[in-house]
Image (tube, grey):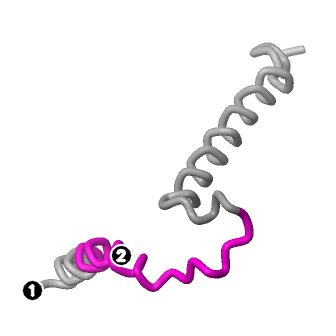
Amino acid sequence: MNDRNKIFYTLLLLINLAPYLYGFYDFDKVNFGIDNFIGFYAIFGFIACLALIILAKLLAIFLKKGETYYDE
């Protein structure tokens, strides 16, 4: 087995075992009521990522220069 296959199978094993680590999460350290919702941090991260992309697209509209900017 070459190194590439070893890396692939190690990553595959880690991805398959990751959901079982959720059982070790300490639900007593919840700061807000919604923190206890399963998948909250994944959903929050996804929404934050989308918000940053939308913000970057809107900012690009205002900061964009014309195509002939350097020709002037």
Q: Looking at the rendering, which quadrant does residue 13 occupy?
A: bottom left
Query: Where does label 1 land, which residue?
Result: 1
* Residue 4 x %, y %: 22, 77
Query: Where does label 2 land, which residue?
Result: 18
**Residue at the spot 80% in from the left edge and 15% down from the top edge:** 66
Q: Looking at the rendering, which quadrant does residue 2 occupy?
A: bottom left
**Kind of residue at disc 2:** Ala
Determine whether the residue tagged by mark 2 lies in a helix, strand or loop.
helix
Q: Relative to residue 4, is residue 36 drawn left or right?
A: right
Using the image as rendered, state which of residue 43 and residue 57 is in the foreground. 43
Q: Residues within 10 Å of mark 2 (few under 14, many from 20)?
A: few
Q: Residue furthest right?
A: 72
Is 24 included in the stretch rendered in magenta?
yes
**Kind of residue at disc 1:** Met
Q: Looking at the rendering, which quadrant does residue 54 occupy?
A: top right
Residue span colored magenta: 11-32
| Image quadrant occupied by the C terminus | top right
* Residue 32 x %, y %: 72, 64
